[in-house]
Amino acid sequence: MHPADVIAALRKRGTSLRKIAHDNGYSHIQRVLTSPWLAAEQLVAKALDTTPQALWPSRYRNPATRALAFRQTRKIVVTMPSSRDRTAPPGTSAGARPSRTRKP
């Protein structure tokens, strides 16, 4: 799938690469559009209710290459919280970020 098509499909679903990355503990995952990244491929595919193989078939043509990627990648559990599942922690307002303290 062309990178612009992936971005458009995510926008149609009301999400973005930045939101997916943030929700799953990454600072960014834009690199997944141009190069193989097993964990990010799984996250994007989950957000689009499809498989990574359907989005990027050329990356999955050589099973040996993908097997190596699976062995070298830490195993992740793909969890995409829906907007209705999000609740603010006690003492904060919904949408407010917790304050950060500097380490000495």
Image (spheres, rainbow, N blue to C red):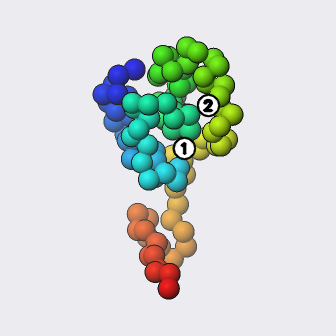
Position of 23 relative to 2 (above/below): below
- Residue type, numbered disc 2: Ala
Image location (x, y in percent) of residue 60: 55, 18
| Measured Cα–Cα span from mark 1 to mark 2 | 22 Å
90 sits left or right of 19 in the view: right
Look at the numbered disc 1 and give the secondary structure of its residue: loop
Label 1–label 2 contact, CB within 8 A: no
- Is residue 54 visible in this depiction of the protein? no
Select label 1 or label 2 by which is in front.
2
Image quarter where the N terminus lies is: top left
Q: Any mark on residue 35, and which?
A: none
Q: Which residue is mark 1?
A: 80
Look at the numbered disc 2 and give the secondary structure of its residue: helix
Q: Which residue is mark 2?
A: 69
Image location (x, y in percent) of residue 84: 50, 50
Between 28 and 13, the residue placed more toward the observer is 28
- Residue type, numbered disc 1: Met
- Which residue sits at x=49%, y=30%? 36
Res 69 → quadrant = top right
8 sits left or right of 48 in the view: left
Image location (x, y in percent) of residue 6: 37, 28
Position of 88 relative to 1 (above/below): below
- Which residue sits at x=51%, y=77%? 91
- Which residue sits at x=41%, y=38%? 31
